[in-house]
Amino acid sequence: MNARTHASETTSWTVVEDGWNPQRANYFETMFTVGNGRLGTRGSLEERHTGALPGTFIAGVYDAYDAPVIDLVNAPDWLDSEVFVDGMRLDTESAQVVEHRRALDLRSGVLHRDTVFRLPGGARTRLRTERFASTADRDLCCLRIEVTCLDQAGAVTVRTGIDANRRNLERLPTYREQTVFGYERKWDKWAKSTHLMSVSAGFDGEIGVIESRTIDSGVDLAYALTCSADSGWAHQRSRHDGIEVEWHFDVGAAETVRVDKLVGIATSRDYQMVRPPRQRALDTVARAVSFDAAAAANRAAWDGLWADADCEVVGDDRVTQALRFAIYHLLIAADPEDPTVSIGAKALSGEGYRGHVFWDTEVMLLPFFLFTQPRAARALLGYRHHTLPGAREVAADNGTGGARYPWESADTGREECPQYTPDGKERFYTREEELHITADIAYAIIRYAAVTGDDDYLFGEGAEILFETARFWVQRCVEEGDRLVIRTVMGPDEFHSHVDNNAFTNKLVHWHLRQAAGVYERMSRERPERLRDLMASIGLDPGEPAQWLATADRLRAPTDPDCGVIEQFDGYFDRTVVPIVDWDDNGMPRLPDGYSPFDCETTSLLKQPDVVMLLHMLPDEYSPATRRLNYEFYEQRTMHKSSLSPSIHAIVGLQVGDSRTAQRYFERSAFVDLDDNQGNTEEGIHIASAAGTWQVATHGFGGVRADAEGLRFAPALPASWQRLRYSVHWRGRPVRADLGQRDARFELVGAGPPVQITVWGRPVTLEPGVVVEVGAP
């Protein structure tokens, strides 16, 4: 049976797997991840299969034991289950799969499964499950198992528990060129890292508890479970690294039995928790009451999220499905209640990039949360303040003062970027040279303050980060005649290392320094006491802000070149021009023959947008003509070997009038996981691409811009879209937009004074609860 995703009458709210195909199983494990921002669990079958890659990942639970680089720990598995009928195990290899369908309900975050097995004697049995990680109670996970003997009576056994014998993937050994392993063996060929040690396991009455500890970081994890059924009898078992409950039923023909399982999860690193993890896990299952009650609460919580986050294209259900799928994975990636964790490159859906946090969070992901879930945006910025001590250590290790954020971050804020690729063949220089992340974080802070008006944050944690990072840049710049330069860096385009004066980096540093000085000046006028306290706590000299401005004035940073092309870095124009002549089935370029991502240094080829990223982040710094010329120049040299690349090209392409190319890039971004168009979705969701897809829809086609000047809309929808509907938060209040080809409707939600926005260049006043319609000029 071939498995595929498809569209049905519920296409825009559902992602479906029809049929069983073991070669596509790892793909669906990623696609069907359930989560709630605190944890994510991959969509593996409850009983597993040969080649399965299951995983549960808890935000902030990292460990470096038995691994060269710290990992986001593959935590104990709360799904672990088996079903037997007349002694035969129901799985995809022991029994014949007659029917198989799974559906992820994006509206409620529930994964539904329906599989019919045929036993050797011909009798059929239906296995149905539902699972979710509660958004109403982020410590709770729920599983329901239903077994129906379709043709004849049978003896049914359901075993379900917690498996704490988990491992992380480790460095892949080097095999002969072009070696490919089938789905049955490919994960077996990896080495494994151990991060968990068992502490205790057992039952107290009907409640089972298992406790583990990460070996190096010393984080305690506790899982508590309760199981219930309407009939049958149960037997409890425990071992040092697992607990389980086994239910036995005598089931009549066409009769169904059900087992409900509730799991409470707590750790010692949970934010602002006082009671021990064991007690909190027990309390979670005690207050859950029942599966149905937990499901109802979870659905209500999701209704609240979607009220603010939904994005719908009227006239294109497939695009709406892609947008909602992206939004779903964004919503299960962030925890608004914990400012000590952030979102890794694969979110909580896989082990890719070891769960490390990159610049993607501030540049790609934060805008979605900023405009739909401001509390989550604030929590993500809180992580950067939480890890500021680590950033100070990184700066000191590199011979400067202030704070320098690492390229890859985990729990402490220290540099966690590996030095080599997983096969050990190639050297990474990103850890030493990709410095722009420090300015990217400053950019995110200023953007958050502009959109939310949250000056308490800006003049508190935000200012501390801005000031400490500005100190780093002053010392990182070096003299070159009467100017200052930044040498030996890598820009967003990672095909070129050891370059001087990367345009993106220098301009963001210039902007960063001026913004830091501006915040200092505002605080001196508006919050002088708060400024005095901050200066005392970090030892800031009153003369330093003037030094930031002087450094910015002397720094070589690309100004508008009067319709010229901005050189990406010193000497870029001298690199060998290697034309792109071949494209794949998705319309994306292939590397020319003889080149790989690690030997493009001498060429003009780019991995991803660099100057174009600069145009995206600071559009007001350059004229429309300059932006168009630079977009056209660099677009034809970009290989899009990062999943964030197409969305940025789509947005900038729309800004410069290239709507045809923009639509192609949007589709590449929107379907990167739904269509698996990079072939690696099995490793985890492309969460930056998910956020980029939302940005293209809202900021690109939807034409929304927000800054200190206000909220502006200039929609320009594709011809095939009838309407685009989404919401944005502006200064604490949602504005709902319903945009058409020649008209737009807006509604301000929530009590408060009127708000003035700009639509197609004209001022429009919004009154709370009143729908205002505006015609296109």
Image: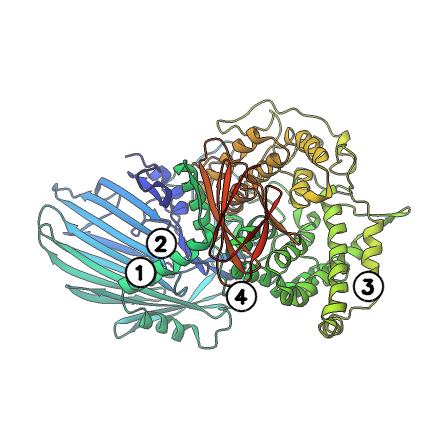
Marks 4, 1: nearer the viewer: 1
Q: Distance between the Cα atoms at labels 3 and 2?
A: 51 Å
Q: Distance between the Cα atoms at labels 3 and 4?
A: 38 Å
Side of 397 relative to 170 (left or right): right
Q: Distance between the Cα atoms at labels 4 and 1?
A: 34 Å
Please give the residue where the numbered disc 4 appears in the rendered image: 217
| Amino acid at circle 2 | Ser
Please give the residue where the numbered disc 3 appears in the rendered image: 544
- Looking at the image, which is closer to me, 517 or 202? 517
Residue at figure coordinates x 20%, y 58% from the top left: 258
Please give the residue where the numbered disc 2 appears in the rendered image: 108
| Amino acid at circle 1 | Ala
Report the disc number at residue 295: 1
| Amino acid at circle 4 | Ser
Whichever of labels 3 and 4 marks the residue nearer the N terminus, that label is: 4
Coloring scheme used = rainbow
Q: Quadrant of the C terminus?
A: top right
Where's residue 252, x and y in %?
8, 54
- Looking at the image, which is closer to me, 694 or 394? 694
**Quick one: label 4, few (<14), some, or many (20+) residues within 10 Å?**
some
**Quick one: label 3, few (<14), some, or many (20+) residues within 10 Å?**
some
Do tag 1 and tag 2 residues touch (Cβ < 8 Å)?
Answer: yes
Side of 88 relative to 190 (left or right): left
Marks 3, 4: nearer the viewer: 3
Residue at the right extreme of this rendering: 481
Where's residue 202, x and y in %?
31, 71
Do tag 3 and tag 2 residues touch (Cβ < 8 Å)?
Answer: no
Do tag 3 and tag 4 residues touch (Cβ < 8 Å)?
Answer: no
In the image, is residue 367 above or below residue 563? Answer: below
